[in-house]
Image (tube, rainbow, N blue to C red):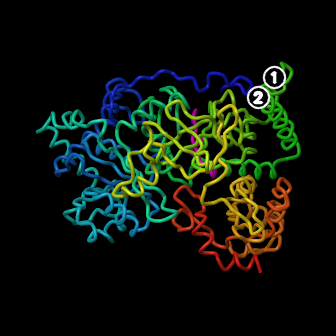
Amino acid sequence: MTQLWDLSGIQANRDIVMPGETIPAMFWNAVKQRGPNVWLRQKHLGLWRSQTWNQTAQAVSEIAGGLMSLGFAKGECTSILANTVVEWVWADLAVLSCGGVSNGIYPTDAASQVQYLCADSRTTFLFVEDDEQLDKALEVRDQLPSLRKIVVFDMEGLRNLDDANIISLDDLRALGRDYLAQHPNELQQRVDACQPDDLAILVYTSGTTGKPKGAMHLHAGLVYTVRGFNTLIAQDERDERMCFLPLCHIAERMGGEYFALYTGTKLNFVEHPETIPENVREIAPTVFTGVPRVWEKFYSGVMISLKEAGAVQQAAYAWGIGVGTAIANKVLAGESVSGWLKLKFQIAQWLALNNVRKLIGIHRARFLVTGAAPISPDLVRWYLALGVPMLEVWGMTETCGASTGVPAERMRPGSIGPAASFNEVRLDPATGEILVRGKNVFAGYLNLPEKTAETIDPDGWLHTGDVGAMDADGYFRITDRMKDIIITAGGKNVTPSELENDLKFSPYITDAVVIGDKRPFLTVIIMIDQENVEKYAQDADVPFSNYASLTRSPEVQALIQGEIDRVNKKFARVEQIKKFFLLENQLTAEDEELTPTMKLKRKLVEKKYAAQIEAMYR
């Protein structure tokens, strides 16, 4: 593991050059170079099963052959409706190898959303994971005239299904083997015919402000960006990472699948979103990319475990994290670390910090990457004090992922870093909006030329909708979304994300939405961390019968008030939160209030809980 006081070289460009100007060309060249090496690992029936590049290539070629045998043409779109599993990657690379367009659909989407996304993209083939996802497709199939076949990964429970337009993945692969035996050169011809300027993938935005928009990414942009990533968060074949975020999201598609394809990094697929804590300890990734919700959850777990620990363990942790914090502060200030402090840190690792890292599963991590939403600077400092640098990156679907990134040797918690070397980033002088220009910027929104023109100006600058600031060293900081800035009735401008991030640093708060636009004072809607608050209630003998009664109990209300008081001390009086409301429903990714990346949708929450909000202002 990189020493906390010496972070130089952690992001050095390792100068990987994988030839190929399209994703399929790059993939098949990678197979030639790395054939017998392990690339993908997935847990099945309690055992981790490895798959080499050659084995992946066989699966991809057979699926591609099956698609071609069923008439799949260059330029047609195929959608994938599944959790993050190995078969997702197979299907994606097979579609691209055929010269097709690949689109992902969140597995939590309802049938109506599946219908909209398939219709908008003119999907001809649909891959689904299992019977649950198949049911959604069948519910809307009659409304999808372009859809010709549905391919099912897992046929458990569907053995007796008799439908001419539904085929199992195994049967599709069998068709592919026969087809390729008769047409041995067609797949290579398809790969060769794929051009850099061809449309490769669609990534639909979350649709928090309307219907989802299909962001179009060309092969040229994807290849250019994954090569650029290695100047930002360098990896190679020695690295292992965990694949668990939705593959239809730009973060895992680019930073996981395609970046690993380029670098040779091993991809380990978790069993299920609920098994992430267990799986990360088994995998012990050397590079770990996650969203703030993941990092907050790990921190909360450690804090709760500490409360159950003995006095000696608590004292050892307190001393150890104190030493780590002292070094972290010097590293962040650019100061040298004395030999005595280094020695104390070695002892701190042995006494406590190594155990904390192993409890989380980051004991082999060279660095952590966080993105997709703002994160509390205090959380970044905590991971650094443990001995693992956390690098914040910023980007969006339309920029093909990360556009800025914090360098390990010059970390600044609260900043998203300077512009990545592969694109330009600047602030609009009139509004402070962050603008991005480069080959990584998307080709526009599918079927929405007017929206595209609104988003990309004639000079090629992408208007991101994020408001920011830049310091003298070129480091950017997100202040908020343009549409989220609050102007109180007294005329005070408030950036709610700062308050929300500080609240989410609490182990008892999962998410928060600050309210106050055109209001006399600020209030907040809070989603509690069920596991940690239940543990608190049990330890304090607080009676509750269900989730709703837990949120209503006076003791829990007082607990959350205490967390709000802690945050309020950091802000001026006009920026402090005066009242709060706890959501009484336990939300999951299936609920409309949450995005697929588990963030509360601000506008929807404000609309749905309007009555509770008004009650806080009476």
Q: Relative to the observer, which residue lies in front, 114 or 89?
A: 114
In magenta stretch: residue 439? no
Circle 1: is it few (<14), some (14-19), or many (20+) Cα within 10 Å?
some
Residue reaching furthest top?
A: 339
Name the element at disc 1. Answer: loop
Q: Is residue 530 visible?
A: no
Can residue 418 be seen here? The reply is yes
Would you call the spot at circle 2 few (<14 residues within 10 Å), some (14-19), or many (20 or more)?
Answer: many
Residue 331, numbered circle: 2
Quarter that holds the N terminus: top right
Image location (x, y in percent) of residue 153:
34, 53
Between 596 and 356, the one nearer to me in the picture: 596
Which numbered circle lies on residue 260? Answer: none
In the shown orientation, is residue 511 left or right of residue 490?
left
Query: Image height check: is 235 above or below 602?
Result: above
* C-alpha distance separating marks 1 and 2: 8 Å
Give the residue drawn at x 81%, y 52%: 307
Asked if the residues shown at circle 1 and circle 2 are in contact, with their CB atoms under 8 angstroms apart, the answer is: yes
**Res. 154 image quadrant:** bottom left
Residue at (79, 26) in percent of width and height: 346
Start-end of magenta stretch: 279-293
Residue 126 in the figure: left or right of residue 276: left
x%, y% of residue 155? 32, 58
Q: Which residue does the numbered mark 1 point to in the structure image? A: 337
Which three-letter amino acid code belongs to the residue tagged 2? Val
Quadrant in which the C terminus is drawn: bottom right
**Residue found at the far left of this picture:** 182
Q: Quadrant of residue 350?
A: top right
Q: Amino acid at mark 1?
A: Val
Residue 287 magenta-drawn? yes
